[in-house]
């Protein structure tokens, strides 16, 4: 190995569009450049104004290309949105009579079998993540190739979403003459860089609270057990503030970032935040506790909703490493203790780990997803070249054939 | 009761000659005629019965109750006492007391048939004098397959129009049940005016793969109960353009064919579009693709009084793209203030099965004969015909309000299947019109009901039908809450709450 390749992650997010150019060498990942533009034409992780969104993507790519001195030809694209769902599923194949040793073909067959699970008609599989195999009922087999058996079963975590909505994001990039190499769920990408293998083994919950949506993903025993998207994010806080305090949305957004906190009871009575007048806004004072109450209510509710969703399955009880918060909203002061209160387990505010290069980029939780996309590309590429340590990730959209065995 | 008898006897003599012109030609105007004439009978509470036969049948009845069908119209018929006693239907009939001794039939249609034959007098008594009978059963088992054809025949012999809703078993239930179902279906088609057939295998697609078995069956029941409701409403709910039973039958007339059914409801700016999209999404229509093959398609559009002609036109244009040029589209249009600002679209058709292309001929005759009882009564000369044209000066000028008389007539509502049933009488009471009379209702007093609505003190609403919506009880109407910048985006719903509305507003926390 030892050869380098350039990988580009593109996150078309609700608050920002972010391009990260990374250089992969062996299992090292170095961030070369980050291009970022504020989004427009996006709501809750999905495109609502196609042309606007396309322009923003073009701009972000141009910035990144310029900074990294790289010509971007293909990207790994992150998707999100409330339509994305997941479940665990077991697929099985019988090994043909004429041989009793399990080989690569059977692995492919069992995966194909999983893909054929019937989804609601408009949906398509985004990822099939193999959790573990069963050989003739023997549980917990990690790599069955070469084993002797008659029946191979595999447990998958299957993530699916509405095909047309995903295609919209893809088309937005394709119209700029850029190839989409892979489509990855934002939450999965974030988890890739935020967690290390040990934490995945222990069990961890990653919540990536972005502008328009919160992605969550649960690892147990080193594999994905639960994932999903709740279409509530920082935009909702901004909207709440704007409506509650009757100030323009943009001003509300700035107020949230500059002064907001998710904790109650820290402000003295009569603690006012002066808002200076500016074009289109007359300026006034707002009560700090009111501001915090609005934020607190929203964040508490969102986290409680997440916990309720996650509690539908038992995996949350086995997350020894606790909760990992990332995404732009994790910068909100007080969010960690609020999360701790809601989930009742240790909470870590985190960002991309195990990458080098621009510190400002990987130490910012806002970029976790985009960096994770690059990491995903690296993992797939390694897998491709045969030395895969991540051969459980083999997610591709139907129609795009997998490039590896 | 006297009138009922009379209707029964004069059924053959009246009928077709009278009914047909009303249906076919220039639909709008004549449709109104039909309404006003038919008004007299439609308030008759004894108008239809839904009979659930066997276990599957009574499940559908339970679901129908949940969906707001009035219980008194439901009859459960079963061999199995245990299942019968669990049913919510007020009228229950155990058949084959001597044959199965209160147990099920064990999947043997011969036993089911014997049971039904043994209880023929009771069945005849239950169904006597009812002009319209819906039968519901799951085919493939004993009671459903065996008893359903018998009940159909009894109902038919007592002079009713009989429409059967049958489910075919899942393929995985085995060949034998499949064969039993097919045999029963064949017999049923001879004895019913129309058979609406649901294939469970297709119904499975309604629910996601993750859904539990229970949920899957519930979805099936729900679809059937919806279909019953729609068919009942189509026949009974009068409207601008009325769909007659003959049209209904011609839409369903395809022996051994598969039922194509879709139902959707929408509200808001795009309601008819949403409703149509939802209806087309029905797996029984294969997302609208199967409509292409239908030779007759029945479309029933219903909405509150704010339904505009333009909306209907646009939505039918959208529908026209889905059907082929040679499909005959039978349009029914109903206005019901109880719907408020919502609108419903129902699509009903059938598609010939490959095997049976000879079908329509034998069925046509019984069908048209059977049309008589139900359709003849609307045209009975006793109805206060003179009243029909008069209301127009009173009515607001726009077209949508034209059909109001029939609608108001629905409201007094001993029981329309439209879910708003229970509350509407309150709305009607201020009117001088004595609700309970059995006398033919004159349009003029009914008109009086209508003005009463907008005249209501609250009367905020530019007659946009908001008032009736406010009275519906099953839907809690909150103050419209602003969603800010998410106003136009798809709502994020979780646990019945719209998460786009600020949390502090939903939790009623006061902020300064």
Image: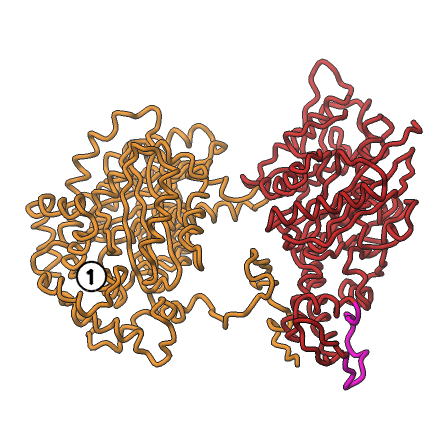
Chain colours: A red, B orange
Residue A147 vs residue B354, the one in the foreground: B354
Residue B338 image offset from top left, x and y in percent:
34, 64
Magenta stretch prevailing secondary structure = loop
Report the span colored magenta.
A258-273
- Mark 1 — on which chain does it sit? B
Q: Residue furthest top?
A: A98
Q: Quadrant of residue B335?
A: bottom left
Secondary element at tag 1: loop
Q: Residues within 10 Å of mark 1 (few under 14, many from 20)?
A: some
Q: Residue furthest front?
A: A279
Determine whether, in the image, residue B317 is placed left or right of residue A6: left
Residue B77 vs residue A166, the one in the foreground: A166
Q: Can see residue B114?
A: no
- Pointer 1 residue: B44
Residue A359 image offset from top left, x and y in percent:
91, 51
Is B390 included in the stretch rendered in magenta?
no
Residue sitting at x 66%, y 54%: A40
Residue sitting at x 20%, y 77%: B432
Q: Can see residue B366?
A: yes
């Amino acid at each position: 190995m030892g050869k380098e390749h350039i990988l580009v992650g593109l996150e078309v997010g609700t608050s920002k569009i972010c391009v990260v150019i990374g250089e992969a060498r062996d299992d090292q990942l170095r961030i070369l450049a980050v291009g970022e533009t504020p989004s427009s034409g996006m709501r809750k992780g999905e495109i609502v104004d196609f042309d606007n969104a396309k322009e923003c993507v073009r701009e972000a790519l141009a910035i990144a290309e310029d900074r990294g001195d790289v010509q971007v030809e293909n990207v790994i694209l992150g998707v999100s949105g409330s339509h994305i769902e997941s479940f665990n599923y077991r697929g099985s194949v019988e090994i043909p009579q004429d041989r009793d040793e399990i080989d690569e073909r059977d692995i492919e067959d069992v995966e194909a079998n999983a893909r054929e699970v019937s989804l609601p008609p408009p949906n398509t599989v985004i990822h099939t993540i193999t959790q573990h195999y069963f050989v003739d009922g023997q549980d917990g087999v990690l790599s069955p190739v070469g084993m002797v058996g008659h029946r191979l079963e595999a447990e998958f975590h299957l993530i699916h979403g509405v095909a047309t909505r995903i295609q919209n994001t893809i088309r937005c990039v394709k119209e700029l003459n850029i190839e989409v190499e892979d489509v990855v769920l934002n939450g999965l990408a974030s988890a890739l860089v935020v967690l290390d293998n040990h934490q995945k083994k222990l069990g961890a919950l990653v919540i990536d609270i972005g502008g328009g949506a919160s992605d969550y993903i649960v690892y147990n025993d080193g594999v994905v057990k639960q994932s999903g998207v709740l279409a509530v994010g920082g935009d909702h806080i901004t909207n709440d503030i704007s409506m509650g305090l009757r100030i323009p949305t943009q001003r509300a957004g700035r107020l949230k970032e500059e002064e907001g906190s998710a904790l109650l009871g820290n402000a003295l009575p009569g603690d006012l935040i002066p808002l200076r007048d500016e074009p289109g806004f007359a300026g006034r004072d707002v009560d700090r506790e009111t501001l915090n109450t609005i934020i607190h209510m929203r964040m508490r509710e969102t986290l409680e909703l997440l916990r309720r969703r996650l509690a539908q399955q038992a995996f949350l009880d086995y997350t020894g490493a606790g909760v990992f918060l990332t995404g732009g909203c994790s910068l909100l002061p007080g969010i960690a203790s609020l999360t701790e209160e809601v989930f009742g387990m240790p909470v870590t505010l985190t960002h991309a780990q195990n990458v080098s290069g621009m510190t400002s980029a990987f130490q910012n939780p806002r970029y976790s997803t985009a960096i994770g996309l690059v990491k995903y590309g690296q993992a797939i590429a390694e897998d491709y070249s045969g030395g895969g340590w991540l051969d459980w990730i083999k997610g591709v959209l139907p129609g795009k054939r997998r490039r590896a065995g | 009761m006297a009138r009922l008898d009379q209707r029964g006897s004069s059924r053959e003599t009246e009928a077709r000659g009278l009914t047909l012109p009303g249906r076919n030609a220039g639909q709008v105007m004549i449709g109104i005629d039909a309404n006003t004439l038919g008004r007299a009978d439609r308030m008759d509470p004894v108008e239809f019965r839904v009979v659930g036969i066997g276990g599957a049948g009574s499940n559908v009845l339970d679901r129908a109750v949940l969906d707001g069908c009035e219980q008194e119209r439901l009859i459960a018929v079963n061999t199995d006492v245990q299942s019968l006693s669990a049913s919510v239907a007020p009228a229950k009939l155990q058949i084959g007391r001597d044959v199965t001794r209160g147990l099920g039939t064990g999947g043997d249609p011969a036993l089911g048939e014997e049971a039904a034959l043994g209880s023929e007098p009771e069945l005849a008594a239950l169904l006597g004098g009812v002009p319209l009978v819906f039968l519901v059963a799951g085919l493939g088992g004993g009671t459903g397959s065996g008893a359903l054809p018998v009940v159909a025949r009894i109902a038919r012999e007592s002079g009713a129009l009989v429409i059967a809703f049958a489910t075919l078993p899942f393929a995985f239930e085995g060949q034998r049940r499949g064969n039993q179902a097919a045999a029963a279906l064949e017999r049923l088609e001879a004895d019913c005016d129309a058979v609406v057939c649901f294939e469970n295998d297709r119904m499975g697609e309604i629910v996601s793969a993750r859904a539990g078995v229970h949920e899957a069956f519930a979805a099936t029941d729900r679809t059937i109960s919806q279909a019953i409701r729609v068919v009942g409403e189509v026949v009974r709910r009068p409207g601008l353009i009325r769909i007659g039973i003959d049209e209904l039958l011609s839409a369903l007339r395809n022996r051994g064919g598969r039922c194509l059914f879709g139902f959707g409801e929408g509200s808001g700016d795009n309601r008819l579009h949403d409703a149509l999209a939802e209806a087309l999404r029905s797996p029984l229509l294969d997302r609208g693709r199967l409509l292409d093959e239908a030779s007759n398609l029945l479309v029933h559009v219903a909405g509150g009084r704010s339904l505009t002609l333009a909306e209907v036109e646009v939505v039918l244009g959208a529908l026209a793209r889905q059907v082929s040029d040679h499909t005959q589209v039978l349009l029914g249009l109903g206005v019901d203030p109880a719907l408020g600002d919502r609108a419903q679209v129902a699509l009903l058709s059938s598609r010939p099965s490959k095997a049976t292309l000879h079908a329509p001929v034998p069925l046509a005759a019984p069908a048209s004969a059977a049309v008589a009882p139900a359709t003849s009564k609307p045209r009975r000369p006793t109805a206060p015909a003179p009243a029909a044209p008069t209301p127009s000066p009173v009515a607001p000028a726009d077209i949508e309000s034209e059909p109001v008389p029939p609608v108001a007539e629905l409201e007094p509502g001993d029981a329309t299947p439209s879910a708003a049933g229970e509350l509407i009488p309150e709305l009607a009471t201020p009117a001088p019109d004595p609700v309970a009379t059995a006398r033919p209702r004159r349009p003029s007093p009914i008109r009086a009901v209508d003005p009463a609505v907008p005249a209501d003190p609250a009367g905020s609403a530019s007659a946009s039908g908001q008032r009736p919506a406010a009275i519906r009880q099953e839907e809690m109407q909150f103050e419209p809450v602003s969603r800010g910048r998410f106003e136009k985006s798809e709502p994020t719903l979780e646990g019945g709450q719209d998460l786009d509305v600020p949390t502090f507003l939903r939790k009623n926390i006061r902020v300064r």
